[in-house]
Image (cartoon, rainbow, N blue to C red):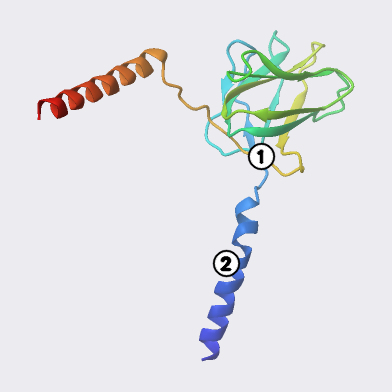
Amino acid sequence: MLTSTIRRCAVAAALACAPLLANAVALSYYQEVGDAGAMPTPQSVTGGPYSGIQGMLGGADEADAFLFYFAGGAIVIEASWDDATTDTLFLELFGDACMSSCGSLGSGSNSLTVTDLAAGNYVLEIATGFAADPPFTIELFDLNQQPLIILPPQAVPSPSTAALLGAALLALGWASRRRRAAD
């Protein structure tokens, strides 16, 4: 009897805490592989989910770009150098929904806020104005400073695939209409 009461209390406590646990996101970082390169050839985020990106600027381009999927909404991007570097930090967010730059920041700030992003693939580029190769950390939050999740980029069907699907649906509709007219 006591055991069943304890079990019922434990189940009730677990159910009460489930919404809180569902919204909890542990900070985990995508680790840059080699030199991510700059635009127009970003490094695709793999694995995940992640709430940030870590790496080190390197190579002649003095910039790194990362391609990822974001589920949409507001995003706050905070970036910092992980050492004593005082280089100027530049961030820029690109996406299909924005058709070009969705937002950027230059010197004097390390936080970029963009609201009302559509779900889709985005490219985040971090750069410095100097030849130094500093390590960096980028963290992604919502407007309430809760960690956000990014995932590997999602495949987008080509226009020819969408046209073929549309043509097939039209043909099916036409065929069923002819069949009904014949009956």
Residue reaching furthest left?
183
In this rendering, would 177 be left or right of 23?
left
Residue reaching furthest top?
60
Residue reaching furthest bottom?
1
Percent of width and height locating residue 97: 59, 20
Displayed quadrant of residue 102:
top right
Along the line of sight, which residue is nearer the eye, 85 or 151?
Answer: 151
**Is 38 placed above or below 118 here?**
above
Percent of width and height locating residue 13: 61, 71
In this rendering, would 82 be left or right of 152?
right
Displayed quadrant of residue 98:
top right
Along the line of sight, which residue is nearer the eye, 114 or 82?
Answer: 114
Please say whether residue 139 is visible from this viewpoint: yes
**Is 159 placed above or below 31 here?**
above
Q: Amino acid at mark 1?
A: Leu
* Residue occupied by mark 1: 148
Please say whether residue 91 is visible from this viewpoint: no
Element type at mark 2? helix
Percent of width and height locating residue 25: 65, 48
Q: Amino acid at mark 2?
A: Leu
Q: Quadrant of the C terminus?
A: top left
The Cα–Cα distance between marks 1 and 2, rounded to whole angstroms, is 24 Å
Q: Name the residue: 75% across, 26% down.
A: 135
- Residue 80 is labelled as none
Element type at mark 1? loop
Q: Name the residue: 72% across, 39% down.
A: 142
Dot 1, how many residues are within 10 Å of its Cα: few (below 14), some (14-19), or many (20+)? many
* Residue occupied by mark 2: 15
Along the line of sight, which residue is nearer the eye, 15 or 81?
Answer: 15
